[in-house]
Amino acid sequence: MRGELLGVERRRFWRDEDKLEIVMSVGAGGATVTQVAQRHEITRQQIYAWRHELKKKGIWSPDAGALFYPLDIPVAAGVPVALHPTAEASPPSVVELRLNGGRSLRFDSTVDPAVLTALIRAVDAA
């Protein structure tokens, strides 16, 4: 059996900043792990390993790209009051609320505040 050398094997060294940029590009513009890996000529597993490594170092958090919006719910006598809808209502969107103990609650943005309060209390009590 005859072997043929096709080229010099290369071993690249990545700085943490480069790894973080690559890991954070997953999901940006709908990019999948496979697409990002192909774009940077690395394996999918390498991205998952970098995620684990950067998370362990405290450099990356799964919530790093999360957007948080202030929630202003008027309260009268301890009970949330429903806001009157405006004429130009925005389309409903999915909201994720992170609670203590690693729990999260996903709900539609049009959910009634009283119902939301009851849900949060039920999840906290569980």
Image (tube, rainbow, N blue to C red):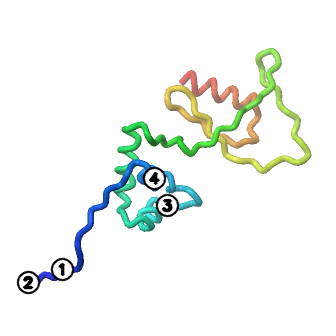
Which label number is shown at residue 5?
1
Is label 2 in a helix, a strand or a loop?
loop
Question: Is residue 31 positioned above or below 94 on the image?
Answer: below
Cα gap from disc 3 to disc 4, whole angstroms? 11 Å
Which label number is shown at residue 1?
2
Most foreground residue, 34 or 13: 13
At x 76%, y 34%, the residue is 112
At x 88%, y 48%, the residue is 88
Tell whether 51 sits left or right of 92: left
Q: Position of residue 69 (x, y in %)?
A: 69, 37
Mark 1 vs 4, N-terminal side: 1
Is label 4 in a helix, a strand or a loop?
helix
Foreground mark, 3 or 4, reads: 4
Foreground mark, 1 or 3, reads: 1
Is label 1 in a helix, a strand or a loop?
loop
Cα gap from disc 1 to disc 2, whole angstroms? 13 Å
Tell whether 48 sits left or right of 68: left
From the image, tell me which residue sits under label 4: 23
Mark 1 vs 3, N-terminal side: 1
Local packing at callout 2 (Cα closer than 10 Å; few below 14, some 14-19, many 20+) is: few
